[in-house]
Image (tube, rainbow, N blue to C red):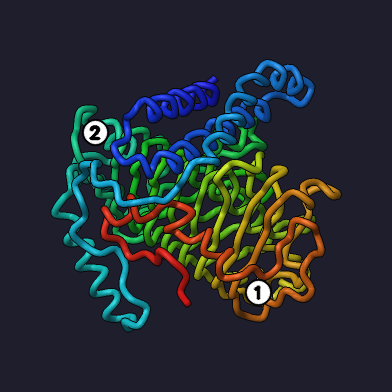
Amino acid sequence: MALLADARKDLNASIYMLDGSINDATTIPAELNNKLSAALTYQGMCVDGYPEADQSTVQSTLKKAQEHTINSLAVVSGLSSSPQQNNSVKRRLLTTRLGAPAWINLDDRRMLDEEEVKGMKAFINITVAKDGSGNFSTVNEAVKAVPQNFEGRFFIYIKGGVYQENVVVSQVNLTFIGDGSQKSIITGSKNIVDDLTTYQSATVVISGNGFLAYKVGFRNTAGPEKLQAVALRVQADHALFMNCRMVGHQSVIYAQTYRQFYRGCYITGTVDIISGNAAAVFQNCQFYLRKPMDNQKNVITAQGRSHKRQTTGTVLQGCSIFADNTLQSEKSKFKSYLGRPMKEYSRTIVMETDITDVIDPEGWEATSGDYALSTLYFAEYSNRGAGSETGSRVKWAGYQGSISKDAALNYTVESFLQGQTWLKEYDVQVRFGLSN
């Protein structure tokens, strides 16, 4: 029922936009596509959440709603979609720049990072500390204490410590600031083997728009034998994660819906590390593949786009892909792939990324037989490294191979996330276009 409520909310928001709630008409198509794509995702998730024997009945019940959403997407696709800066949103902006240029040496970078955190702490509204030195000793207490009528951005500082709890953030414009992604850690162990769904297994759930996390760790310690066990589930628009760490095994990041940006994050796991159907860009992130169970293969992405008009997909740009210490000496025993299709129109683009030889020469894996192989959109652009050669890649109809620069430009932060309209507000370090 919660998923249906989310779908209804997005459909109503789409109608509200058409009634004139947005001042800049040029942003309306992108906003409508964003809301309608999410609504269709929620409708599909509602069906998937039922036992297989009941899914056809639920599908029939939702048929008209899904048709309405799909038809609306078709109408919006005919509209112009030139994103421009939207200055109507009032937020407390960050005065520091989150991230340092690559050419700065490690010692100077650490010093700059420390200064950045000090600058951000000037905005702190609530401090969480396990030792009792803050306002609260748990993250949940701090989140619940956020005033409902607070205007602007609200800052929660999470002091170093391991916080064993499951957190749900529904407030808008909330910021988590940590002492470091290996110091300030939120951890849990929920999983599907213990009678939960993937949706319910997340250690941290973000549903409030405009969320920002800086130097925080998100972890699920359920272990590989527990199968899907999510560390971070995000269904928030304009969600931003900077210098964070996401650790788990299967389904580490559930990038569920809306527009999400991950910059400079450390991400490690095994099977379907990134799943969901958001419009998500991972930029300058490091992916470390772990040793899976003996009957498993490593897969970085399992994107869930269900209709060709949804403006969703997973993009890896300027990232690095490695085997971690548990896999490095045994990587010849386990195949590792860039991605596989979770839904019929799955879309994943890997570009300007360092792909080491941990990735199998075929690059991509089928999910089940020839399912989605002709309708998916998997593509690569200007990658490097021993695992980047496309000559031995899969020969599926939907695999695009190495795409042109013009095609790759469609999946940059500026084009794919309309990043110029919201990321500039945070003054974050971001590449809006291609590096070359």
Q: Which residue is mark 2?
A: 146
Residue 265 position within the rendered picture, expressed as x and y whole percent measured from the top left: 44, 62
In the figure, is residue 38 to the left or right of 428? right
Kindly identify the residue that appears in the image at 58 percent across and 28 percent down: 69
Task: Check the image and report above or below for 232 versus 284.
Answer: above
Kindly identify the residue that appears in the image at 29 percent across and 81 percent down: 107
The three-letter code of the residue at mark 1 reads: Gln
Residue most extreme to the left: 122
Disc 1 on helix, strand or loop?
helix
In the figure, is residue 351 to the left or right of 160? right
Kindly identify the residue that appears in the image at 59 percent across and 57 percent down: 269
Q: Which residue is mark 1?
A: 328
Q: Do we see residue 165 in this rendering? A: no
The three-letter code of the residue at mark 2 reads: Val
Residue 37 position within the rendered picture, expressed as x and y whole percent measured from the top left: 54, 37
Viewer-nearest residue: 424 or 284: 424
Residue 363 position within the rendered picture, expressed as x and y whole percent measured from the top left: 72, 66
